[in-house]
Amino acid sequence: MAATKRNVIFVLAAIITGLISIVFGLGVIRASALFAHVTAGRPWLPFLLCPAGLALIVFLTREIFPGAQGSGIPQAMAGLQMQDPADVDRVLSLRIALGKFLLTLLGFAVGASIGKEGPTVQIGCAAMNFCGRLGLERTHVLQRLLILAGGAAGITCAFNAPVAGIVFAIEEMARSFDDRQVRSIILAAFASGVTLFLVLGYHPYFGFSHATLRPGVIWLLVPLCAVTGGVAGGLFAQVLVTPARFMPAILNRTASANPILFAGLCGVVLAVLGFVSHGQVYDASFGEAQAALTAGVLPPLAFAPLKFLATLVSYLSGIPGGIFAPSLAVGVGVGTGFAHLIPGLPVAAFAMIGMAGYFAGVVQSPLTATAIVIEMTSNPAMTVPVGIAAILGTFASRMVCKEPVYHAMSRQFLRVVERRPIATPNTAGLAPDAPHDGTAG
């Protein structure tokens, strides 16, 4: 009877996560379209919107929604380690979930290079945590099940990819294979996936890719592309984990003493990158990635490094937002860069290979990277080269960044929580993942 009640609550929370994610996803589309509309023909406007917008978001995060900054995935993973349910309730509260929802939309509306998946995971975990209070005995085991199920539902909803959601929760969050955990994860992922299917129908995130990689010498470039992406992804992860090592002392002091000013400076850099890229690096760069993956359209050769930097400054500014979607776009740029250098390469195929290598380099989870790339393009024909790229990208990343980025961030977040309680609206002080102390979450 208890197991039935628990399963009902898991399904209910997954359905709620699915419905919220639909609204959230539509909001992201509208916010991105709004930024594109108001800046069209006004190349000077992002130089006002980006700095002012990022500074405003950091102000609102610190003063009204403290704890909502960063991706949301490290916070959820930190919750897996917390023994006290009260600590989990603070980290995965409905207030923080609301802040994540609203401020991420505002980030898209001002052009930040962020994704929706991290916030969706935290929102999913908050929904699971809230529903878990409905008559269930609060134990650490149940708490872990709720958070893992919320993570699976969050990734499923963000990318309409239930298999990727399941693999992510098992490989990246749980780091173990436990039968009871897996059953709960699968239940939540497919309940949220069915919700999306009933409301929106089946639409792969990037559309249908028909890329193939025929046997031949061209396969010799797969390891090179994968390793290039993996090293770049590892570098990105290392900067996020220890940003103070890579920033000049004056910027570290500014981030510590005046985080709102620091966010404004990040906005200026973002606007410069947007101007140089003709607007291609704003938001998640979904259009550029989709065109390469489904139609073989080459983005500019400079797209990958510019998107890399735009995502970096957006994240280090301290605003809420995920890194999944922007990282996938950077990976597309890495793969298509080989098509620029070697004419005749299949653009869509190497876009997928580069995407898998770079994304695996960022998260160091090859199964998750493979599942996400294949499911988001609905192209199982590319499973072997994509899988190879994900494995090699992970190995290459570990030469640059020794610990997976989300695990490093979750440990940093836990240290901050143990040092002091999660801030409240009336509590001044540093955000748990402020960039200067190496905890950009």
Image: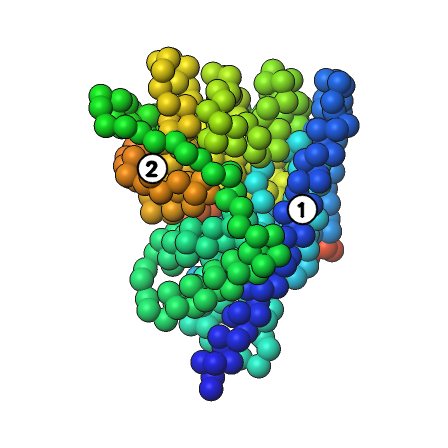
* Residue drawn at 37 percent across, 57 percent down: 170
Left or right of residue 143: residue 27: right
Q: Position of residue 52 (x, y in %)?
A: 74, 31
Q: How crowded is mark 1: few (under 14 residues within 10 Å), some or many (20 or more)?
A: few
Left or right of residue 53: residue 251: left
Left or right of residue 293: residue 30: right
Left or right of residue 395: residue 152: right
Q: Decide: marks 1, 2 in contact (CB < 8 A)?
A: no
- Kind of residue sitting beneath label 1: Leu
* Residue drawn at 35 percent across, 19 percent down: 345
Quarter of the view holding residue 184: bottom left
* Residue drawn at 53 percent across, 46 percent down: 203
Q: Which mark is residue 329?
A: none
Residue hosting label 1: 26
Q: Position of residue 215 (x, y in %)?
A: 23, 28
- Gap between marks 1 and 2 measured at Cα: 29 Å
Q: Residue 382 carries which label?
A: 2
Foreground: disc 1 or disc 2: 2
How many marks can you see? Answer: 2
Quarter of the view holding residue 121: bottom right
Q: Position of residue 58 (x, y in %)?
A: 68, 40
Mark earlier in primary sequence (1, 2): 1
Q: Is mark 2 on a helix, strand or loop?
A: helix
* Residue drawn at 62 percent across, 44 percent down: 320
Q: Is residue 177 above or below residue 334?
A: below
Residue 440 showing in the rendered view: no
Q: Where is residue 349 in the image (x, y as percent from the top left)?
A: 37, 29
Residue 104 showing in the rendered view: yes
Quarter of the view holding residue 210: top left
- Kind of residue sitting beneath label 2: Met
User: In this orientation, which residue lies closer to the viewer: 214 or 60?
Assistant: 214
